[in-house]
Amino acid sequence: MTKANYFAVIVGVGVLMPSIHDAMAQAAPACTSVATSPFLGPATNWQWHLGAGVNTPGGSTAQLQQDASGNITGTYFLNSESGAACVGLQYSVSGTYQGNGNFVLNMTNPVPPAGCAAEIVFQGTLSAPGCDQAPISFTNNIGQSGSTTISHGCYIPGETKPSLLQWGFKGNPPTVATFQQTFTPTVSDGGPSVIDWGGRRIYEVSPPNTGSDSCYYPNTFGVVKNEAVTGGDLYIISGGSYKDDIGASTDLVLFYRGNLPGTINRAPCGLQVVQDTWMACQGPPSDPDQVFARNADSYGIGTTAVTAVRAGSGATTFWSPAVSAANAVVRYLLKKRTN
């Protein structure tokens, strides 16, 4: 839950204003969740990848859980690549997430067959953008050691209904609404296992030919149709929420209200886009990125008010600038037109 978790403006602003927020300016944060959650089911089990060898984690699997304090528990299953005597052995797992993507897993089996380890230790670091891979080193109590990469299927969150945060949030124009969006499950869900989605990258795309713009008309100002999202992306810093802007520049609102010389009053009119939100993945061996939400977003321009809607949550604000403000915009637009 941080102000850095933004998409860029969703409903485009034409050429009259640059993007409000450059989400790509963020550095990739550390991944904050090692384990799968029971909310997501067995399809997201970690998969261990390494060549054949006694007590090595080649092809073995683990079902893990991580609580809000970073404690990891679960079961580790050795597979047929681990040596005939050790096939099917189960180990109890206890471990910790240590911060900055680092984790330690301790596996124990109190009565293993001869030649099989009773204790195995993994140390690794999760990597963005999907937080679904990690290089690890491992050791055991019978003198074996090695390194490999572990990975799991791509996590796909759900989403709650968004809520309006504010019009004109953090320097945005007063004609742009910022909505707060939250994933499910998240650390707030409680229970024996939770997910902190920090470190994961999400991005937005509009499917082809799904938007509409009833405000647009041919013009010499360079204003274009707005029928798709602007295509922003971001990293979740921690927890499971981000902010999304729906709106247009004050210039574009004045343009479509016919408040500028040479323009036509199109209000009331509106812009609609379909927003697919994707989770970036990097799992075994070519786990594709996946859509986890498809929303209908819209923006309406009235004669005195504007309305923003994201995923069924709407908000309206009244905005009608003074004549002096409108004249300043006129001068700006005329300058743009003659350059």
Image (cartoon, helix red, strand yellow):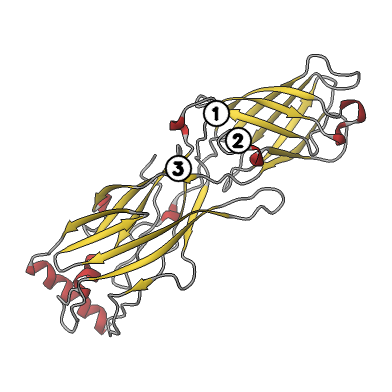
Task: In this rendered view, identify the residue nearer to me: 17 or 10.
Answer: 10
Note whether residue 248 is visible.
Answer: no
Please give the residue where the numbered disc 2 appears in the rendered image. 36
Q: Quadrant of residue 315?
A: bottom left
Q: Indicate which disc, 1 or 3, sits on the residue closer to the N terminus.
A: 3
Position of residue 112 in the picture relative to residue 123 (left or right): right
Residue positioned most to the left:
323
Q: Quadrant of residue 288?
A: bottom right
Q: CA distance from mark 2 to mark 3?
A: 15 Å
Please give the residue where the numbered disc 1 appears in the rendered image. 193
Residue 252 screen position, x and y as percent = 25, 70
For label 3, the crowd category at 10 Å Cα-Cα, with few meaning under 14, some 14 to 19 and many 20 or more, is: many
Discs 2, 3 touching: Cβ within 8 Å:
no
Quarter that holds the C terminus: bottom left
Tag 1: amino acid: Ser
Note whether residue 44 is visible.
Answer: yes
**Residue sitting at 83 percent across and 21 percent down?**
117
Residue 242 screen position, x and y as percent = 40, 46
Task: In this rendered view, identify the residue nearer to me: 31 or 62.
Answer: 62
Task: In this rendered view, identify the residue nearer to me: 38 or 78.
Answer: 38
